[in-house]
Each structure stands twice: as C-alpha cells, then as structure tokens.
Image (spheres, coloured by chain):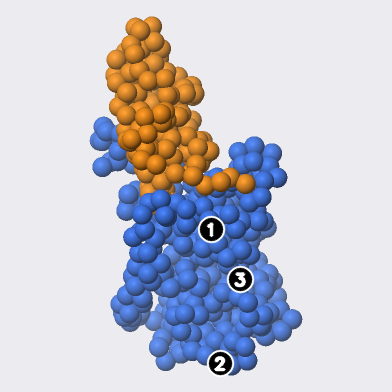
Amino acid sequence: MDAVQDRTFEPKIVGFLCNWCTYAGADLAGVSRLQYPANVRVIRVMCSAAVDPVFVMKALLGGADGVFVGGCHLGDCHYTRGNYFTRRRVAMVKKLLEVIGLEPERLELEWISASEGARFAEAMRDFTQKIKALGPNPVKERKVS
Amino acid sequence: MTKCNEIVQDIVRSMLRAKLVDEVVAFGRGINESDIVPLFITDEKDAEKIVTISYYPCSLAKLVALYGDRNKKIGLVLRPCDARSLVELAKRQQVNLANIYSIGIECYGVVRAGSNSHQVYIFPDTVQMDGETKPLAEDVLAPNCRRCEYMVPTMTDVAVRLLPDGGCLVDANTEKGQAVLEAASIAVTDMPALDLTALKERAARWKEKDFGELKKMAAKDRLHYWLAQWEKCIKCYGCRNACPICYCKECYLEPEKQIVKNEALPPEALFHVGRLLHVGDSCTDCGQCEAACPMGIPVSKLYHMLYEELSPLFDYESGFDLATLPPVSTISDKDLTKTGVTLD
C-alpha cells in the first residue's frame, strides 16, 4: 500500500520535550491557540539528556512512526550542558537506525525555547508531514509473536 | 610448542619470581591438549601450562573485572582485541590498570569452537580439525577476526610480536613493560617494520563482503533481515555475559527493569537494540558475543557495522587511549563550537 496515497494514515509520534524549554514552548503554542497536528503524544522529561536512547528505540520498535526530541538551545540548558549530550546520543541513534534498516528521519531533534510557541507548532507540522511522506513504520509489518 | 609459548611462559615465570605480580591470568591447558581454560597462576611452576594458540574462549579482561582483586597486582596474557577491551573497562573504572601488567600477543585471528567438538589450534598457521591438520585459512577464522585490522598489541605493557619464520620479538610499550622485561632479562629488540598491508587488505575485503551485501539491500529488507535474525533469540543472555564491555551490575535487560517484556520468547527487538546502544560506540569487535550465541545470530557483524559508522562520526577509536572517554558520555571542545542539531 502506497503510504503517500493512503489518506487515512495518521502517524503516531512520540515527543520527548524538555521541561524547561520545549515543553514550555508547547504550552505557549497551546495558550496562543496555534493549530498543529494532534499526532504527537508529548512526554515531559526534565532534560532532553534524560531521554535514554533506549526510550527512543522502545518507541520506534514498539510501532511509533516517529520520535521527536525537543531541548533548549545550546548554551541555554537548565543543567548547563545536557543538550550537548543529547545531540551526541541522537547522532548515535540515527546511525543505529540506518544500520538496522529504519529511516533515520524518523527521529528528529530540535532546539525550541519557551518563547518559541509558533516555532513549536511549525516543527510539529513539518515533522508530521515528513513522517506522512515516509509512511508507516515498517516494524509494524512484521507479526509480533 | 611454538617459540611464542616459551617466551610468554618465561616472562610469566620471571614476573612471579620478581614479585612484580601476585597472580597471572592466562589461557592454559586444562585436562587435556584440546581443553583450553583460563588459569589463575600464583606459582611459577604452573607457568608451563600456558599456551598461546589461536583459540580464545572468553575475555580475560572481563574475568579480571568481575573477579579480580583491585589491590592485587595482576599479570594478563592477552590478544589485542581483549587488550582493547581491558582499556575500555579501565575507562569505565571496572579494572585498576595501575595494578595490571598486560602482555599482548600479536594475533592474526582466532578460530571459534564450532560444531567440531575437539579442535586443536597450533599457532600461527595450522589447525587440527576432525583429525586432520589444515592450514589456518581465512575461512576457518572467526568472522570478526577476518575483519580485524588491529593485529599488533600497541596498548599493552609488553608486546610479543610474531615473525614469519615462527620466531618472536619482544618489545615494551610502557615503563611497566620495561620493568617486566628487565625482570625476565630479555633485551628489548628494535622492532622491524612488519608488512601488514596483506592483513589490512584482508580486513577491507571481508568488511566489504560482510557489510557490503547488507548495505546494498533496501532499508526495509535490511530491517526484516535483522528482525528475522533476532527472532531466533532464546534470550539466554549469552552475548551480554560474554561481552567484555557489558559491565553494568544492574542490567537494563533484566526483567525487573521492565524495559524488555518479561517472559516473551523470542524477546522483543529492543533486547538486542538496547545492548547495541550501550556498547555499540566502544565495541572492540572481539567476537565473544557471536561465539557465545547458541542460535547463530551474527551479533558481532551488527556491532562492528555500527562501530564502523560511529568511529569516524565521534572521531573515536575504542581501546587505545585511556584519556579519551566513551563518545556518548563526554562532549568535546569541538562540540561547543557547533550550534546545529547535528554534529556536522
């Protein structure tokens, strides 16, 4: 089935948002009544560096179509350097996805601050669009015993 | 017995005699010629049991990390891949490298215990398999050894190098190594530049063969290839227990951590991916995981493939420099100058 043609495909996206920036950004998008796709399921974490790569892989192998990680801009991290670690981990997981045969584009990292509500809404729109174009997660094709 | 055996036995004997070390961990004869077991040697009389054949049943570095006394001085006779694992364990504070005297033996690959029950391997170039002596050809070597390009133990205190005529040369890489050689009254010989191009070429060729066909596949086919491999898993934890770098006392993969579903067989793919995430960045490609796997999953192929991708990305070579920490638990000065969401 061609996923792009499949109008009914609504991707499931797991979003790990950092408590201090991106989650507040999402909050601002909400109170500003900005429209963005409801495909993202938000999980608030204290820092983007608290997102263990295992959580990302658990989501993707469990059938999520995309994973979004949002953190503070570099230098703005509440814990000083957390997002530098996140960047390295995301780079690692992207390589891993490539090696095992999943599209690395299914994982996205963005720096979104608490004042960037509009940018959060836009990032959600773009990412959902990207995942829609990629189609459903191929892991789901395989029967899980 | 080869000359390499005698030299290593000599070094071990004099290390014990000079009280440089309290005990030595090395592979040696067990109940018979084909029974190779790790030995903890405290008496110099037992040094004659040490053998240095092309068979390496487990990681000695891991044994020392698990059971070794950090305050005792320990001598270790290692292959280069295990010596690299030792350095990786030291970075993770699992061994006290200051108290370890490592003797590295140059290695052109080892053979894996396979379906043939009793195989005796005589280093460097023959293998006795099913009663006949065969040359140690590429196809009897462990797959990870065919891809290996680190034959020379540059990360150990003492390096024992093999010469094409069957002889050996001994070199000291560190001050500790020099002390060992002084105790053994072995003169340090100037190392002739050995030609390793043929072996590097072998590594490149096998990498191309092993990884090439997977890389050529469409992404979806590759995913289903790995998912099918993982479905063979019987969750015996053999790969984790054999891996020298898997050091966690409380493992993610244990059911009580509730990351991987309990009592599911085959375990979900996360069982494999989770471990890959933990050690993939510092894999030394020792092949112990693949050798331990009873279901024949090509584990080390996957780990080595990821390591080959991550190594240039993080500019990290595992197992050499004690000062460079594992790439995902550190950030570099170069990172601070980049502002994007990628490392480029």
Which residue matches tag 3?
B57
Which residue matches tag 1?
B229
Q: Is residue B260 left or right of residue A134?
A: right
Tell me the shade of chain A: orange
Q: Earlier in the sequence, mark 3 or mark 1?
A: 3
Residue under the image location 33 percent in, 19 percent down: A120
Residue B298 visible in the shown view = yes
Residue A21 visible in the shown view = no
Q: Residues within 10 Å of mark 1 (few under 14, many from 20)?
A: some
Q: Residues within 10 Å of mark 2 (few under 14, many from 20)?
A: some
- From mark 3 to mark 1, how far is it between C-alphas? 24 Å
Q: Amino acid at mark 3?
A: Pro
Spot occupied by residue B103 in the image (x, y as percentages of width and height): 52, 71
Q: Amino acid at mark 1?
A: Gln
Residues under numbered marks 3 and 1 in contact, where contact means CB atoms less than 8 Å apart: no
Q: Earlier in the sequence, mark 3 or mark 2?
A: 3
